[in-house]
């Protein structure tokens, strides 16, 4: 009699479909590596100088924040600047510990909770709430802030099976699609000229990004800034329409993969031209910005595009086994092969 096998750990509908979606463990590892990268960037020599205070802390507090929030963030930045060296080492240490904890299956839950708490602190004091209250925030240039996106990834990465169990279920696709849609809808909303003209906002952000770019990309950004200043409205309308399409297109199963692919390509362009790759090449970046996090989210949703794979002819279930999911099967059907666990 053939030796019975355990159930196939691959989630139904994914077998034979090529690339499977990232599960909670893979998302947790990705988030852990991002925190470790952030820790390494925090230890750059420039971070121990006043440049860190000027480029990060005071920038978050003063760049068009509304009055009460500006005062609060300015006072916090002043306290942080007074203890800059200690603060820099502390930030790097926390992020390194978070990364190590997320790479450990035993510490996954407390590390994810700590990651959410720390990301909230970074988003508030280091990223000025993603500049969402300033009227200058656009997802093309890093809104709503990488730290807020870290929180979204942490929610998707929360373990949903026994630690170390093979075949753990993938991150919830429904929650991932809502996060994806929310991100792109926010991108479309931010193009509304609620405080400043659209062309001025695009030009301002492109000029800011250009200051963090190497020579050739700097010239491209300055050229785009001049063009955006004179054609801001049609550019904003086009970008908002594309972003709304990406938000809606992830829901029909047949459209999901093309929409995700287009979203990743567009995000890569935003990351290079609008986010200046987080300012890493300029030596002043404290994180890679939102681009890589959005790409990680897309990998979580990729799956099989909602198409179920064709049945494996080598595996067949008896009528009783179809009714009882607790029954296992072997590759070659034979009498008596089904056994309860």
Image (cartoon, rainbow, N blue to C red):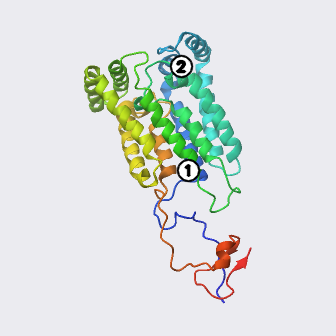
Task: Tell me the residue that label 2 is attached to.
Answer: 57
Q: Dividing the picture into quarters, in which one does residue 195 lie? A: top left
Q: Earlier in the sequence, mark 1 or mark 2?
A: 2
Q: How many marks?
A: 2
**Which residue is painted at 64% across and 74% down in the image?**
322
Asked if marks 1 and 2 touch (Cβ < 8 Å), the reply is no
Residue 250 in picture, x, y percent from top left: 46, 47
Q: Is residue 305 left or right of residue 324?
A: left
Residue 166 in picture, x, y percent from top left: 64, 62
Task: Tell me the residue that label 1 is attached to.
Answer: 173
**Which residue is painted at 37% across and 46% down in the image?**
262
**Which residue is painted at 48% across and 18% down in the image?**
134
Residue 244 in picture, x, y percent from top left: 41, 37
Does residue 43 show up? no
Does residue 51 show up? yes
Mark 1 surroundings: few (<14), some (14-19) or many (≥20) residues within 10 A: some
- 51 and 191: which is toward the camera: 191
Residue 38 in picture, x, y percent from top left: 53, 35
Q: Quick one: SS at disc 1?
A: helix
**Which residue is painted at 58% across and 45% down in the image?**
175
- 277 and 160: which is toward the camera: 160
Q: Is residue 206 left or right of residue 46?
A: left
Q: Look at the image and tell me in which quarter the N terminus lies.
A: bottom right
Above or below 120: residue 266:
below
Q: Is residue 158 left or right of residue 53?
A: right
Q: Look at the image and tell me in which quarter the C terminus lies.
A: bottom right
Mark 2 surroundings: few (<14), some (14-19) or many (≥20) residues within 10 A: many
């Amino acid at each position: 009699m053939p030796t019975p096998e355990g159930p196939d750990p691959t989630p139904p509908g994914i077998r034979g479909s090529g690339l499977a979606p990232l599960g909670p463990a893979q998302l947790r590892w990705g988030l852990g590596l991002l925190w470790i990268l952030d820790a390494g960037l925090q230890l750059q020599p420039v971070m121990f100088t006043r440049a860190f205070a000027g480029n990060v802390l005071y920038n978050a507090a003063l760049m068009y924040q509304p009055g009460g929030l500006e005062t609060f963030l300015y006072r916090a930045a002043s306290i942080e600047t007074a203890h800059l060296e200690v603060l820099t080492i502390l930030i790097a240490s926390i992020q390194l510990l978070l990364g190590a904890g997320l790479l450990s299956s035993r510490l996954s839950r407390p590390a994810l909770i700590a990651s959410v708490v720390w990301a909230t602190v970074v988003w508030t004091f280091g990223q000025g709430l993603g500049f969402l209250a300033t009227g200058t925030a656009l997802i093309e240039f890093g809104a709503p802030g990488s730290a807020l996106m870290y929180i979204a990834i942490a929610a998707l990465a929360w373990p949903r099976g026994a630690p170390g169990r093979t075949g753990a279920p993938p991150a919830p696709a429904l929650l991932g699609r809502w996060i994806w849609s929310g991100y792109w809808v926010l991108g479309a909303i931010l193009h509304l000229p609620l405080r400043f003209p659209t062309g001025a906002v695009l030009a301002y952000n492109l000029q800011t990004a250009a200051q963090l770019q190497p020579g050739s990309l700097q010239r491209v950004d300055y050229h785009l800034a001049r063009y955006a200043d004179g054609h801001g409205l049609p550019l904003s309308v086009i970008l908002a329409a594309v972003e709304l399409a990406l938000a809606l297109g992830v829901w029909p199963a047949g459209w999901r993969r093309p929409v995700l692919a287009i979203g990743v390509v567009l995000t890569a362009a935003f990351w290079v031209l609008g986010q200046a790759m987080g300012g890493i090449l300029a030596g002043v970046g404290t994180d890679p910005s939102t681009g890589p996090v959005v790409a990680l989210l897309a990998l979580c949703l990729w799956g099989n595009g909602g198409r179920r794979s064709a049945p494996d002819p080598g595996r067949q279930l008896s009528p009783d086994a179809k009714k009882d999911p607790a029954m296992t099967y072997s590759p070659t059907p034979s009498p008596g092969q089904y056994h309860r666990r």
